[in-house]
Image (cartoon, grey):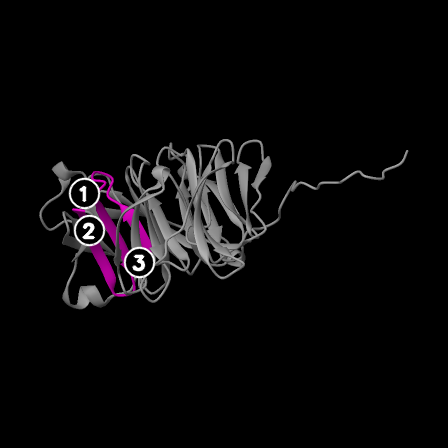
Amino acid sequence: MSTEGLTAFLDFSHCFGAKAGIRDNVVHTSETMVAYPAGRHLCTYNTETRDMSFIVQAEHVESMTAMATSHNRKYIGVCERLTDGGGQVTIFNAASEKRVRTLTHPDCKFFTALAFSIDSKFLVTVGCAPEYTLVYWNWYQNKVVASGRVNTQVKRVSFSPLDNVQLATSGPGLLKLWRLQENTLKGFNMVSGKAAMQSFADHTWAPGERLLAATENGDVLVIEQGELRGTIKSRLSGETINTIACYSSGFIIAGSEARMSVYEKNDAKDRSEDRELYHHFKTFKTSDSLGEINSLSLSPGEENLAVFFSSNQVAIFPIASV
């Protein structure tokens, strides 16, 4: 039989390993599904069936720089570098794996971080150096609500879980709250003095208005209503901390020595004025061969923890074993 005129198409079937160098290298899109970068494409993996599928990037997309999922897990946001040196943010439907929106901004050559609001209607992005411009989007309408320059490196940006008009940013010498006021983003420092000079590796919001900020040297600052409430000296002090993740009972920090340290909340009724807000529960050691822990992602039901290692591997741990 003649094959003249026939065209062959190849689809991705499986990938080995994952790509490092991305903010939030692994994210949960459901209780049993995680997404992570595979080369310049996006792999979705079912942790129960071990099936893989792929969101294949367009030819003009060179690489990804950051990822985030919406709180309702319906959408995946990806910051993308383009072959012409520019950048864009693409929003994908997690279930259909189809593109929903593509966002660009004239003040951002490319983007380095992003986050969805708690109701998933809004998006905040961070542009590249040297301005590190914050852009607040009504993303579904492709509309810029407000923008403002941070002028220093931003490692993490997030929305308050209680208030869509309040944001937080962290990075080297940066821990700041931002409020959307009359289409303007206004920033307020959360700490001052020596505390403000620390390099903040990551931050996360605990239930309520409490923010937990992890420094690279292993301290965790507890911020409530924009003010420093206390500092926790973690069991990982002396290691380089890369990431922090919050869950309903406490938080997990992880970093350079392939260890995760788990802290749980102290009950208010049992807590005296001089007792810390959290206590150390356990420290979990993974294999040294896996390298540093760069990213953590808790499943929506807090049953599983996805971990991205600097060896470009993703591992899934039952929370009960951590």
Q: Residue at x 44, y 36 (%)?
A: 29
- Mark 3: amino acid: Thr
The vertical placement of 321 against 221, above or below, is above
Element at badge 1? loop
| Location of residue 259 in the rendering, given as x and y in whole percent from the top left corner | 41, 54
How far apart are the alpha carbons under marks 1 and 2? 22 Å
- Which residues fall within the magenta stretch? 156-182
Closer to the camera, 208 or 117?
117
Element at badge 2? strand
How far apart are the alpha carbons under marks 3 and 1? 25 Å
In the image: residue 291, left or right of residue 221? right
In contact (CB < 8 Å): disc 3 and disc 1: no
Q: Which residue is mark 1?
A: 209
| The stretch drawn in magenta includes residue 161 | yes
Sequence-wise, the earlier of marks 3 and 2 is 3
Q: Residue at x 21, y 56 (%)?
A: 176
Q: Residues within 10 Å of mark 3 (few under 14, many from 20)?
A: many
Q: Which residue is mark 3?
A: 133
| Location of residue 42 in the rendering, given as x and y in whole percent from the top left corner | 53, 45
